[in-house]
Image (tube, rainbow, N blue to C red):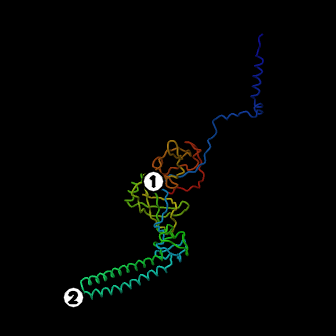
Amino acid sequence: MRVSFGPLLGSVAMAVAICAMPACSAGGEGLPQQPPKGGGPQQQAVPVTVATVVQKSMPVDIRVIGSAEAYSNVAVHAQITGELTSVGFKEGDDVKKGQVLFTLDRRPLEATLQQAEATLRRDLAQAANARAQAARYQDLQTRGIATREQVDQTSANAGALEATVGADRAAIESAKVQLQYATIAAPIAGRTGALMVHAGNLVRANDTTPLVVINQVTPIFVSFAIPEAQLPVLKRYMGLGSVTVEAQPPSETGPTSRGRISFVDNAVDAMTGTIKIKSTFPNSDRRLWPGQFVNVIVTLTTDPGAIVVPSTAVQAGQQGDYVFVVKADQTVDLRVVAVARTNGTESVITKGLRTGETVVTDGQLRLVSGSLISVKPSNAPKVAS
């Protein structure tokens, strides 16, 4: 039996044709819409911020982390044993060189001095008598009354007493020195630390715990280390006399403290590959404090014609650093650049940019080469020319 599909196919074709009419299309909600003919939608502009490439003087510097150190440090100890009778300062005070800090009980030392002086007076009298006897026996020998042995004995007695007098004088000087140790004065000018012993306590000579520690903070040292690869450059510019050092605590703003390099270590640390350097700062405003970490900038020289862009304009890619350069038609071009160094919020470019070009500083994540942009206001600081 043969089945004919002719009438059925005709009915299906007619239903499809009817459905394709405008009335059926209007009622077919949820069906995918076709884009209008005559081309795709217009490209949307990406909002970005921009900055101008400038040429200006830029310092050639080394930036490291350092620490402040006291210019001089003295741990004050007692040199005699005795009772601490008075303290002449408050902990944390600034003291002058020679200022009395501590006083120990002087009475035992004064008694020792008086005893030594009395012994000297006694021995002086005995020495004078011995010299007189030696002179008499010398005269008696010339007249044949005294023997040679008696003359030698009296001369030896006089010499022994003279030596005793010399020992007595030395004992007096020692007693005077011990008495001076009862008054402890500041050996340097500086700032005192915590007071370890208070009045009324017994202190011992050369005890391991100091009475107080004095740090000289004006001037002050800042110690830091640089890689050994930068040492030849530093030495060259130090020879030209153009090196300056700036330091600033990380949490502070405003002008930096300025100093000079005063010490370069005589050997490179083989463990770290760095060399230690110290710089001296006047520190009259006392912004730097011993033990404090600071940001150190060693300025070697100045590049008068550096090409500079904000550091936010430079992006890192697989082919190296790059920036987006804005063209006249408000599209961008991806440009590979060579960054020589970064100075704060600015980067020095040695290859890839020219003065006067405009680069994108924010919004790069949505850009590709050829993207259309629109410039939005920027709160970022501009690169000073």
Q: Mark 2 packing: few (<14 Cα in 10 Å), some, or many (20+)?
A: few
Above or below for 203 versus 375: below
Above or below for 20 versus 116: above
Point out which mark residue 104 bears.
Answer: none
Q: Nearer the viewer, residue 91 or 259?
A: 91
Q: Nearer the viewer, residue 202 or 14?
A: 202
Point out which mark residue 144 bears.
Answer: 2
Point out which mark residue 306 bears.
Answer: 1
Query: Can residue 30 be seen here?
Result: yes
- x and y percent of residue 182 in the render? 48, 77
Q: Earlier in the sequence, mark 1 or mark 2?
A: 2
The quarter of the picture where residue 32 lies is top right
In the rendered structure, the answer to whether residue 66 lies left or right of residue 171 reads right
Q: Mark 1 packing: few (<14 Cα in 10 Å), some, or many (20+)?
A: some
- x and y percent of residue 180 in the render? 45, 78
What is the C-alpha distance between the residues marked 1 and 2? 109 Å
In the rendered structure, the answer to whether residue 33 lies left or right of residue 355 reads right
Query: Can residue 57 be seen here?
Result: no
